[in-house]
Image (tube, rainbow, N blue to C red):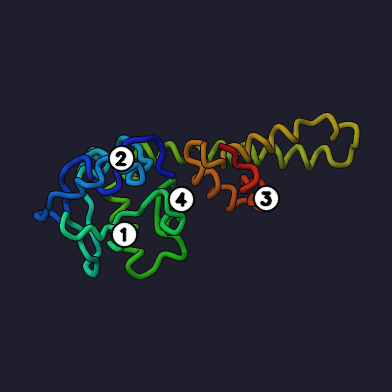
Amino acid sequence: MIPALDFCYHCSTKLEARRSGDATDPGYEWLAFSWENFRLSAQRSNRVSKNEARDENEGKGNWFPLLETSPKACWENRCEATEQPVLLDPVRKADVRLIEVQDDGRIGPSLICIGSAWFRVERSIELYGLNLPRLKAARLRVMREVNDLYSVLSQILEAAAPAVAVADGMPIDKLVESITEKTLPSSAYSKAARAQLMRLPGGAAFCAKPEEVTN
């Protein structure tokens, strides 16, 4: 998940697109007022920040690299629909499936990430700053919360199951709702919550289903 509002996917409002360390061009000025160009992003992911652990600058800034085989759009040839961006698009499900939250809280390539997709993921992690220490710590916090809730639920189910009267008085529904809520797309770091649940026996059953997602 890449939360909060703050960036244009094609860098159009920045009036410049940085393709490599020494290559830039005017970018996508014709998309400046196109609502379809806007995406979701965290402020730190969109702006250049220092990774305190590695003492390196990270963040998208005006970066918008393309794969070597990609055409490049310009005023005279507005072929942005056929471009092959390196950066993952947070509103494309196919792109989101390429990443997963690892057990240490870091973002990494998923099992289906192979070929050029692997390069895209690694570069996106770097430029979006997805593994900045504070983001990693926040994911780990949510993962611990999910793990604790699941542990309490498991203990209650095991202890109360033999006694009907006791079981009927336990806050099982409330605990299940609390766990599921953390996996809703609207919840912060929901991808981390889902990843943690998938590692727990039977945990997948508590992830939010499509019909449970409301606007």
Q: Amino acid at mark 2?
A: Phe
Q: Quadrant of residue 179?
A: top right
Amino acid type, residue under disc 3 in the picture: Ala
For label 4, the residue is 101
Q: Return the residue at label 3.
A: 205
Which label is found at residue 7? Answer: 2
Which image quarter: residue 21? Answer: bottom left
The answer to whether 30 is drawn above or below residue 168 in the figure is below
Residue 60 image offset from top left, x and y in percent = 25, 45
Compare marks 1 and 2 and give the one earlier in the sequence: 2
SS for callout 2: strand
Residue at (15% x, 46% y) in the render: 16
Residue 58 in sight from this viewpoint: no
Q: Nearer the viewer, mark 2 or mark 4?
A: 2
Image quadrant where one finds the N terminus? top left
- Please tell me which of labels 4 and 1 falls first in the chain: 1
Q: CA distance from mark 2 to mark 3?
A: 34 Å
Can residue 53 be spotted in the picture? yes
Q: CA distance from mark 2 to mark 4?
A: 23 Å
Q: Earlier in the sequence, mark 2 or mark 4?
A: 2
Assign a secondary structure to mark 1.
helix
Q: Which residue is mark 1?
A: 81
Q: Badge 3, how many Cα within 10 Å: few under 14, some, many 20+? A: few
Q: Residues within 10 Å of mark 1 (few under 14, many from 20)?
A: few
Q: Is residue 186 left or right of residue 149?
A: left
Q: Amino acid at mark 1?
A: Ala
Residue type at mark 4 is Val
Front: mark 1 or 2: 1
Q: Decide if residue 154 is on the left or right side of residue 17.
A: right
Q: Secondary structure at mark 4?
A: strand
Proximity of marks 1 and 3: CB atoms separated by less than 8 Å: no
